[in-house]
Amino acid sequence: MKLRFLLVGVMAASLAASAAIAAPPPGKGKPETAGKPSTTGPTCKPMVTVVLKGTIDTASASSLSVDVTSANRWGRAYVPGTGLTTVGVDNTKVRRNGNTTPAAGLLKGDWVLVQARACKAALAADAIPPLTATRVVAHPAKA
């Protein structure tokens, strides 16, 4: 009886070991990038949120020109010294004083907080990729 248990145990262990060691031959199986998300383009992974704070210089229906005064970790490259930052605003939630407004309704000197999404890889080494805002919150300039 003990011998039977020993033989069954040895056979089970050898099957498990052979399945674990087996690998497809070279050139067969999945390529290294199969199933992995792209690190560039509109569907890249991982994406990060870039938050910029500053004042409006010019506003149109399709873009904002912002003088950035501060930013989160991912937006450091857009802070002073880079001049005005242009941010696209198609399909963007724009609010001024809590009310929905078109992007062209923002005035020069308005304080803004801009949220945009960008590829983490595109922001490497303080690169400055173009941004399209997902949300803009504005308040009138203080008198």
Image (cartoon, rainbow, N blue to C red):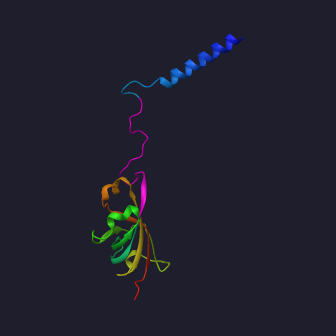
Return the residue nearer the eye: 41 or 82: 82
What residue do we see at 64% from left, 15% from top?
Answer: 8
What residue do we see at 41% from left, 38% from top?
Answer: 34
What residue do we see at 37% from left, 75% from top?
Answer: 54
Residue 42 lies, in percent from the top left, at 38, 55
- Farthest bottom residue? 143
Which of the 4 image quadrants contains residue 127? Answer: bottom left
- Report the predominant secondary structure element of the magenta stretch: loop
What residue do we see at 51% from left, 20% from top?
Answer: 18
Quadrant where the image shows the C terminus: bottom left
Return the residue nearer the eye: 47 or 126: 126
- Farthest right residue? 1
Which of the 4 image quadrants contains residue 101? Answer: bottom left
Residue 17 lies, in percent from the top left, at 53, 22
Does residue 94 lie above or below 11 as drawn? below
Residue 38 lies, in percent from the top left, at 39, 47
Residue 92 lies, in percent from the top left, at 43, 68
Indicate whether residue 36 is drawn in magenta: yes
Indicate whether residue 48 is drawn in magenta: yes
Quadrant where the image shows the N terminus: top right
* Span colored in magenta: 29-50
